[in-house]
Image (cartoon, helix red, strand yellow):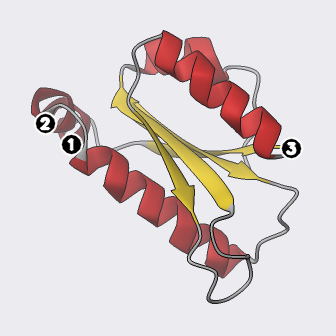
Amino acid sequence: MKQVILVRKDLKMSSGKIGAQTSHASVEAVLRSNKDKIKEWRKDGMKKVVLAVRDKAELLDYKERAELFGLKVVLVSDAGKTEVKAGEITCLAIGPDSEEKIDKVTFELKMY
């Protein structure tokens, strides 16, 4: 079991901003996920992997792919109070779900 969070490189967010945005994505995805999957994920150590995508178009493409596999997805958009304009989509959480299922969607992406 794992969760992945895809982050847009084109926004050039600071490491602190990336940390905040990926946290928003992770928490929201867990709140919306199946309780049994959450329990299994917690037993496995709550693995999270942050991956890089080029831009919004690529992020949305991965969202569609994940949805086709029946994976839980959550898009995060910024409030616009610091580095990114209001409403800008910054990242996408996928899962938690089986590593095998998630890897079918995100296998070619590199870590951020």
| Residue matched to label 2 | 39
Label 2: element kind: helix
37 with respect to 36 (left or right) = right
Q: For mark 3, does the 10 Å Cα neighbourhood hold few (<14), some (14 to 19), or many (20 or more) residues?
A: few
In the image, 55 versus 1, the foreground residue is 55
Vertical placement of residue 108 versus 63, above or below: above
4 with respect to 53 (left or right) = left
- The spot of residue 2 in percent (x, y) is 40, 33
| Quadrant assignment, res 65 | top right
Mark 3 against mark 1, which lies toward the viewer? 3
Label 3: element kind: loop
Among the two numbered marks 3 and 1 on one chain, the one whose residue lies closer to the N terminus: 1
82 with respect to 103 (left or right) = right
Q: For mark 1, does the 10 Å Cα neighbourhood hold few (<14), some (14 to 19), or many (20 or more) residues?
A: some
Type of residue at label 2?
A: Lys
In the image, 15 versus 77, the foreground residue is 77
Vertical placement of residue 23 versus 111, above or below: below
52 with respect to 91 (left or right) = right
Type of residue at label 3?
A: Arg
| Residue matched to label 1 | 42
State the separation of the CA atoms marked 2 and 3.
32 Å
Q: Are marks 2 and 1 in contact (CB under 8 Å)?
A: yes
The residue located at (44%, 21%) in the rendering is: 99
| Quadrant assignment, res 90 | bottom right
- The spot of residue 33 in percent (x, y) is 24, 36
The residue located at (46%, 45%) in the rendering is: 48
Label 1: element kind: helix
State the separation of the CA atoms marked 2 and 1.
5 Å
What number is the disc on residue 54?
3
The residue located at (11%, 35%) in the rendering is: 35
Q: Are marks 2 and 3 in contact (CB under 8 Å)?
A: no
